[in-house]
Image: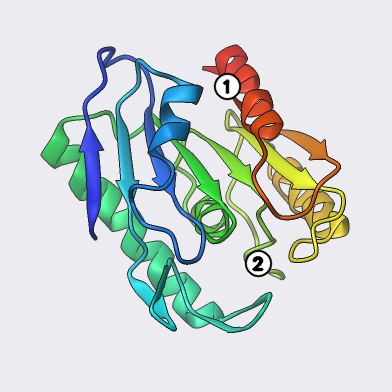
Amino acid sequence: MKHIFQQGPNKDKPTLLLLHGTGGTEEDLIPLAGKIDEEASYLSVRGNVLENGMPRFFRRLAEGVFDEEDLVFRTKELSNFLDEAAEKYQFDRKNIVAIGYSNGANIAASLLFHYQHALKGAILHHPMVPRRGIDLPVLAGKSIFIGAGTNDPICPAAESEELASLLKNAKAEVHLHWENFGHQLTFQEVEAAAKWYQQKF
């Protein structure tokens, strides 16, 4: 997968896995990494799927309707890539915190839904529920921040609450943060995520 890895000054910190939104690239969320933890290494990945020329992490059938078969396949692909990257760049595979926005947050949530040890924690900006009707692995010890907008047209408030509840039922510790905005990622939301991260990691 096309990516950028940057070694941080403190190897004991988590490696931040940066996952862009639809139409983004591996450059997009790099400024966020510095705001969350300037001492951490980061691995920023570009989605392998193109939708009308725009990179994404998995296919969808329509707005808000995921291609589940492709989602499962791409989630496995990303999980395998993390195994390879940890070996190549010599970072702790068990100490990865994902930071995803929109489509990137959805694939990060899917990693949590499908692989118990894929992530140590996650900052999910405007995610949706990746899949319904499946049993989640036990996520005890995982800390997850969900940033949501009260007026988000793509990801309604009920969707954010459902995702938080599914993760909590899987024993994850979840913090649901609300902004009175739509689907955009605001400075205030990033600040709240940074504050949360500093308390948890």
Q: Secondary structure at mark 2?
A: loop
Q: How many marks?
A: 2
What colouring does the structure picture have?
A: rainbow
The residue that disc 2 covers is 134
Going by the numbered disc 2, the residue's amino acid type is: Ile
Pinpoint residue 73: horizontal percent, then vertical percent: 40, 73
The residue that disc 1 covers is 197
Q: Is residue 29 above or below residue 102?
A: above
Pinpoint residue 56: horizontal percent, then vertical percent: 44, 68
Relative to 138, 21 lies left or right: left
For the point 63% across and 17% down, which residue is it?
A: 195
Taking the image as drawn, is residue 122 in sight? Answer: yes
Pinpoint residue 14: horizontal percent, then vertical percent: 38, 24
Closer to the camera in the image, 9 or 29: 29
Gap between marks 2 and 1, in whole Å? 28 Å
Going by the numbered disc 1, the residue's amino acid type is: Tyr
